[in-house]
Image (tube, rainbow, N blue to C red):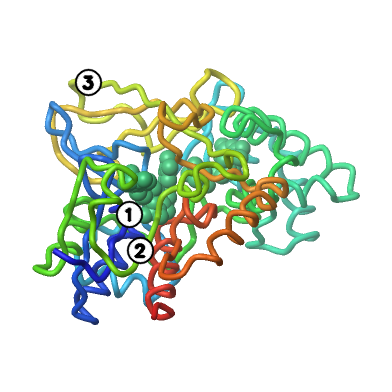
Amino acid sequence: MKYDWVIVGAGLTGATLAERLAVERGARVLVVERRRHLAGNAYDHYDEKGVLVHRYGPHIFHTRDHAVFEYLSRFTTWRPYIHKVMAEIQGQQVPLPFNLNTLQALYPKRLAERLEQKLVQRFGHGARVPILKLMATDDPDLRELAEFVYQNVFEGYTRKQWGLAPEELDPSVTGRVPVVVARDDRYFTDPYQALPADGYTRMVERMLDHPRIHLLLGTEFKEVEGSLRFKRLIYTGPIDAFFDYLHGPLPYRSLRFTWQNLRAVRVQPVAVINYPNEHRFTRTTEYKHLTGQESPFTAIAYEYPEAHEPGKNDPYYPIPREENRERYQRYREEASKLRGVFFAGRLADYRYYNMDQAVARALKLYRELP
Ligand code: FAD
Ligand code: UDP
């Protein structure tokens, strides 16, 4: 069969584009996916004890983009969920992002009150201050607080997660988890925060359930490219791999997970506990908090970051820093020479997208396609 479009990757980017092209334009679409399942890194499934887990790390949908929320709501209902994270700091589990409650838990009462006043005076109540900005303050007390938060929350975690110090990365990376000048323990503040009621995989299945969309799972694109007949291509995998690493590999971070399945209703106070300093893993996730599932069993994942090695492990995170952006630009220039080939997604755009940003990017590309 001759396809109008081949889409490489069945993650949220590929699924959104396939759905739009088939439904709105009546196009015949083939989605080619290397993994044996849909939904990319958002994939969820039931483990051997029947507990719903996210295979590639905890995925919490959150957005302020009404159009994206409305679009995905065509394929799922939602379970409202406000994400809470705690960090183990000096042997105590305290709320994260670091906020006025965290300050109170870790500092003597008087000093906590003085620092709170200074934070409010300097930044205003409710401010969300990136750690690298707090480090630059000239008030000696706030400087000392910044030093404490840097060392106890950011430095160890960031070195484990990225193999780099916080200031070696784009400030937007640590800026995702600011110091919050309020008693607000929420990890995200977006107006829409929820999980798809039947899971991400089911949602993506519904997106792709269309007679004009065909799926080829467990298939590496390069291995079938020559035998496929199609007019245009959308590629959502790593852009450096597409060009056979012509300008050298783009670094991505990968993750390794170990799993525990326990006969217990719940073992953690919240879904995610971060370990900025202790242990080699960065965080543990207890999935039942996210899904609300009732079961006599519970599943916990331990997350160990590692370098991505093509062919050995999967790329999970682009590494946002100047030298990588420059290399990415060289691939972008190659991409702009091609006709009928389009790139989008967290791996192809080399951008640290959240799910809503991946969907927004796909919807934008869709509107621009010939
Ligand atoms: P992907 O999901 O990576 O999909 C790309 C697909 O292309 C993959 O399935 C891959 O197998 C396939 N592919 C690549 N190359 C080829 C090839 N040559 N041939 C065939 N197939 C190929 N976002 C949030 O909003 N909230 C969260 O809480 C959140 N948590 C996250 C936690 C972790 C640990 C990670 C890694 C990401 C998290 N994200 C979160 C981000 C989210 O996963 C992404 O925004 C989203 O999945 C991007 O979708 P995508 O389709 O662009 O990429
Ligand atoms: N971060 C940190 N300590 C923490 C949480 C986050 O240093 O306890 C930094 C770290 O660099 C991390 C980044 O902030 O990679 C973004 O954190 P987020 O929780 O958004 O990461 P993700 O869920 O995308 O892996």
Please state which of residues 346 and 275 is positioned toward the viewer in this rendering.
346
Instruction: Name the residue located 12 percent from the left edge and 67 percent from the top edge.
Output: 210
Q: What element carries label 1?
A: strand
- Amino acid type at circle 3 is Leu
Q: Mark 2 points at which residue?
A: 233
Residue 283's x, y, as percent? Answer: 46, 30
For disc 2, the neighbor class at 10 Å (few under 14, some 14 to 19, many from 20) is: some
Q: In which quarter of the image is the C terminus?
A: bottom left
Residue 208's mark? none
Proximity of marks 2 and 1: CB atoms separated by less than 8 Å:
yes
Q: How many marks?
A: 3
Q: Which residue is drawn at 44% across and 31% down?
A: 255
Mark 1 closeness class: few <14, some 14–19, many ≥20 residues within 10 Å = many
Q: What residue type is labelled 2?
A: Leu
Q: Which of marks 3 and 1 precedes in the sequence?
A: 1
Q: Which of 305 and 25 is in front in this view?
A: 25
Q: Which of 322 and 289 is in front in this view?
A: 322
Observer-side mark, 3 or 2, equals 2
Q: Give the number of the mark in front: 1 or 3.
A: 1
Q: Is mark 3 on a helix, strand or loop?
A: strand
Does mark 1's beta carbon lie closer than 8 Å to ligand 1?
Answer: yes
Please tell me which of labels 3 and 2 falls first in the chain: 2
As measured in the structure, the alpha-carbon distance from the residue carrying label 1 to the one carrying label 3 is 37 Å
Which of marks 1 and 2 precedes in the sequence? 1
- Residue farthest front in this picture: 226
Residue 136 higher or lower than 258, as above or below: below
Q: Which residue is drawn at 60% across and 34% down?
A: 162
Toward the left, the furthest residue is 211
Mark 3 Cα shell of 10 Å, populated few (<14), some (14-19), many (≥20): some
